[in-house]
Amino acid sequence: TQLLEQSPQFLSIQEGENLTVYCNSSSVFSSLQWYRQEPGEGPVLLVTVVTGGEVKKLKRLTFQFGDARKDSSLHITAAQPGDTGLYLCAGENSGGSNYKLTFGKGTLLTVNP
Amino acid sequence: ETGVTQTPRHLVMGMTNKKSLKCEQHLGHNAMYWYKQSAKKPLELMFVYNFKEQTENNSVPSRFSPECPNSSHLFLHLHTLQPEDSALYLCASSQGSKVQLAGRETQYFGPGTRLLVL
């Protein structure tokens, strides 16, 4: 069974601070996706990283895929209250005929004004 | 806007009731998924339909029965549920493919149905 460990589980910071959340596994994934889920809503895809070592930027968010494609990080610069939500990482399983995602438990981020 | 709708948004049912959850996608996708999201647990994949064929049943108890009449609609029929089945049930869709291409299958989620079993 492939597992994804996300840390920290909870994070509460002040507006303007920087933060990094992590997603780690002992398994290799074909790709890794980051989602944000707001209360009462389903997860919304933020980014997909495919290549080992890949870095993608989305405004104040920077995503990195580990060289070995087993881990990933999300860095937010100058966090804003609108960044509040549950951040989920999901690894795409390698091989096979079915497309499956393995999700972590998520990091619940609260950005206080 | 995700283009995936779910009804009802909230459902309270007794253990002897029969109910159904509905999911509809307006994105022209061919793959649809049911997930269960419980507190303090990762999102759990329940069922996958690809081109209307069930391709995954992740050891889900038979009291959950999926139905996919066409590529736009997905149902989850519920019967004699247990209190531990209370959770947020999420539907998702993706383009779907006969050939798996890494990183090409973005899943779009609906808002979920919050289910409480009494």
Image (spheres, coloured by chain):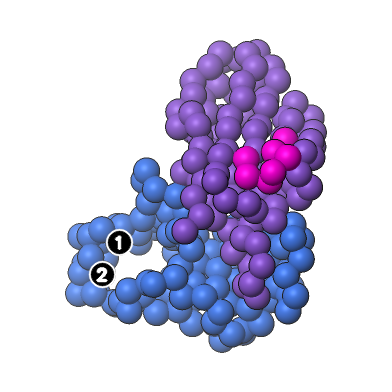
Three-letter code, disc 1: Asp
- Please say if the residues under marks 2 and 1 sit with CB atoms less than 8 Å apart: yes
> Which range of residues does the magenta coloring cover?
A64-71
The residue shown at (44%, 64%) is: B8
Q: Position of residue B67 (x, y in %)?
A: 49, 82
Q: Position of residue B56 (x, y in %)?
A: 52, 75
In the rendered view, does A31 fall on the left or right side of B117?
right
Q: Position of residue A77 (x, y in %)?
A: 70, 20
Q: Is residue B22 above or below residue A9?
A: below
Residue B43 painted magenta: no
In the rendered view, does B24 fall on the left or right side of B39?
right
Crowding near pointer 1: few (<14 within 10 Å), some, many (20+)?
some
Residue A68 painted magenta: yes
Residue B85, which numbered label?
Answer: 1
Distance between the Cα atoms at labels 2 and 1? 6 Å
Name the residue nearer the viewer: A45 or A98: A98
Q: Would you name the residue on which mark 2 appears?
A: B81
Camera sees residue A31: yes
Residue B28, which numbered label?
Answer: none
User: Which chain's colour is purple?
Assistant: A
In the rendered view, does A85 fall on the left or right side of B99?
left
The residue shown at (72%, 30%) is: A61
The residue shown at (64%, 57%) is: A92
Crowding near pointer 2: few (<14 within 10 Å), some, many (20+)?
many
Chain ID of residue with mark 2:
B
Name the residue nearer the viewer: B51 or A48: A48
User: Which chain's colour is blue?
Assistant: B
Q: Is residue B36 above or below residue A99?
A: above
Q: Element at badge 2?
A: loop
Name the residue nearer the viewer: A2 or B42: A2
Q: Is residue B69 above or below residue A32?
A: below
